[in-house]
Amino acid sequence: MTQEEIQFTFDTMEEQMEKAISHLEAELQKVRAGRANPQMLDGLFVDYYGARTPLANVSNINTPDARTIVIQPWEKAMLPVIEKAVQAANLGFNPQNDGIIIRIAVPPLTEERRKDLVKKARAEAEHCKVTLRTSRKDANEEIKKFVKKGMPEDMGKSAEEKIQKLTDAYSIKADKHIEVKEKEIMTV
């Protein structure tokens, strides 16, 4: 087995792990932490002339202060459609349509709701760790195939150790992300 094949296995695994961390970061951005944030509305789609379109593609979304999200559609005809989409998303928001923009007052979080959000954030971190472990398993299986094809066993063992160190490093990254998010959620 060539060093290039082993390096390709490491690179593939690291790429998968990097994607898992990026996905975790994106999902944690969507978890509400008391402050108004335009990313709270990520994943919200509206019916734009028969096409399911992301809200951000039909409007400007801003946060003028810590408790308000303002949605300014590019077409006034979209106001009622956006308002219905926000209500249907069941995010706990009550949009106010004034004929020009839609204001969303972000209510302060209750202690119970904060704990639920922490659970949700931890679940996202666990999904990330499952992906990391799957990547580790795939890479280890690849190394075992190389050993069967003639790679020296000590080389295989050192490759598996390197794989484990990489997995541990990414697992620590995931833990740090969740720790920061928990602190953000629980801060009143």
Image: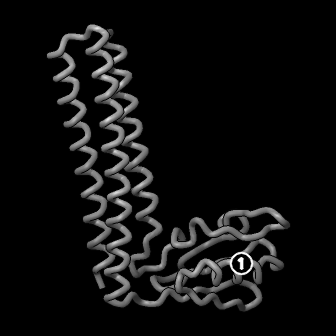
Task: Look at label 1 and name its amino acid.
Answer: Ile
Q: Where does the image place residue 37, in percent across and percent down from the top left?
A: 49, 74
| Residue 31: image location, x then y, percent | 43, 71
Quarter occupied by residue 186? bottom left
Q: In this view, does 27 lie to the left or right of 112?
A: right
Percent position of residue 181, x then y: 32, 68
**Left or right of 97, for residue 49:** right
Q: In which quarter of the image is the C terminus?
A: bottom left
* Residue 171 % position (x, y): 26, 49
Secondary structure found at label 1:
helix
Q: Which residue is drawn at 65% across and 65% down?
A: 56
Residue 154: quarter of image: top left
Task: Quickly name the residue at label 1.
Answer: 82
Question: Relative to 169, does residue 29 appear above or below in the rendering?
Answer: below
Q: Nearer the viewer, residue 187 or 27?
A: 27
60 vs 30, nearest the viewer: 30
| Depth check, front residue: 142 or 117 | 142
